[in-house]
Amino acid sequence: MPDTPNLPVLVIGAGPQGLAAAAHLLERGLDPLVLEAGPGPAHAVSQWAHVRLFSGWTELVDPAAARLLEPTGWSAPTDGYPTGGEWIEAYLAPLAAALGDHVRYGLRVTGVSRRGRDRLVDAGRENEPFSVHVVDGERRESKLDARAVIDASGTWTSPNPGGADGLPALGEHAAAEAGVVTYLPPTFADADALAGRHTVIVGSGHSAMTAVIQLGAVAEANPGTRVSWVLRRGTGGVSFGGGPADQLPQRGALGLGAKAAVDRGFVELVTGFRTDHFDLADARAILVAEDGRALPPADRVVVLTGFRPDLTFLTEVRLDLDPVLQAPARLAPDIDPNLHSCGSVMPHGAAVLAQPEKDLYLVGMKSYGRAPTFLAMTGYEQVRSIAAELAGDHEAAAATELVLPDTGVCGGAGLFDETASADGCATDSGGGCCGPAAAGPQPVALALNAR
């Protein structure tokens, strides 16, 4: 065997899971090296710094990271629900600073392979270290050897398009280049600038609900403002989340707030609308559905239809991914929205995430592929288990040290046309999530005006 134990464990991405992975690896006596494409820690989170998380502080701090930070005089926040910016300022940036030279910025991973072995070669494959190709901000190339690779690069840079077939709708690229289409949640300044205008929101997840609430408030305060919320599902597939059944109260409040915006007439719900193409006219976009329906011209189209993993730099390693979700095959059955009406998943670690390429792991949002409803707590448990496995502590790697809250979420991405019952739950969805959770916490008001 080569002297791979002296090589670092390379972590791709300095987001919440990547930084937590480094903390766990250090605690296990291993040498982490975190490569971040952005200019600072949690660069993806900084892109939605204004958005308030639905997880509270107690669910957003990794235990090993807290232990690393405590000697610096840092104390863990405990109360409230931070924005993305507050998450960085109070936790992620201090954690990155405590990790010091173990984190490097402005370095984008462009390829992962085995040293001297392409994807086809079996002989001696596992005896060779990983070869990781990197490019910096000045487009200079280099490569690093690593004993293991943890891909925590997330999915933020690969948003799903607005087209109903998973491909960009005809004209979507042109509308995006014209500045009419965006794939980012609107900032407060963006929302205020849309007063008196027509905005179309495409998507059904939590990001879309946040935008619906935000722009619904603008419509309430500014008569003449129009907001259209476009869903691909038919009327029966509309779900506003778990509400009181959600054991994460702020997440339940998102659905209730979005429903209130629709019920009060500040947001128009457009269902069963599967976008075929965009027509540009006078710096506005007209969305046309596959059935020929067309929406009034929009000044802004906010496409929040989820994300997909970037697998382009992993083409020379051997992966076992689900053909539908592009998530690790062992994990996919538990998170596939076509199979489950609930967004819950059992805690899992190294055994579930292991790939045919030994010592390569996909974690965090990347591990969920195209599936939604990922929680930071889930990622922290993933990297804890993987660090234990890489350190040879198989018993700790197999143990479960996390209890996840129930989601209370009803409905899945594949439920397009079924009939809804009076409470808004699909009658033939397989159910089980629509009833209130026993002794679950009640939803709290969303701080819409918090900056």
Image (cartoon, rainbow, N blue to C red):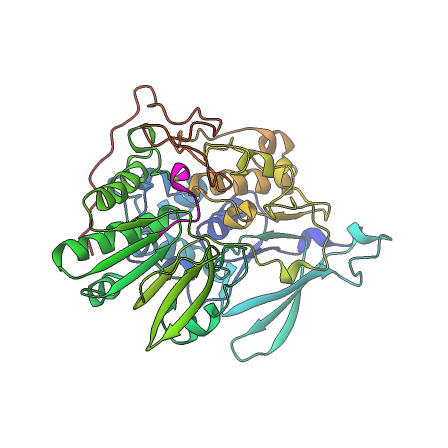
Could one spot residue 186 in this view of the protein? Answer: no
**Count of marks placed on residues:** 0
132 above or below 318?
A: below
Question: Residue 245: percent from the left, percent from the top?
Answer: 33, 28
354 left or right of 302 in image: right
Q: Residue at x 62, y 47 (%)?
A: 361
Nearest the viewer among 281 and 115 is 281
Could one spot residue 149 in this view of the protein? Answer: yes
Question: Residue 434: percent from the left, percent from the top?
Answer: 37, 27
Nearest the viewer among 175 and 271 is 271
1 left or right of 32 in image: right
Residue 234 included in the magenta stretch of the image: yes
284 above or below 202?
A: below
User: Residue extending furthest front?
Assistant: 292
Question: Residue 34: percent from the left, percent from the top?
Answer: 53, 58
Q: Residue at x 24, y 62 (%)?
A: 191
Question: Residue 176: percent from the left, percent from the top?
Answer: 42, 71
Nearest the viewer among 345 and 11 is 345
322 left or right of 59 in image: right
User: Residue extending furthest top?
Assistant: 438
Location of the C terminus (image quadrant): bottom left
Residue 225 included in the magenta stretch of the image: no
107 above or below 202?
A: below
Nearest the viewer among 231 and 176 is 231
Residue 200 lies in quadrant = bottom left
Q: Which residues are magenta?
A: 230-237
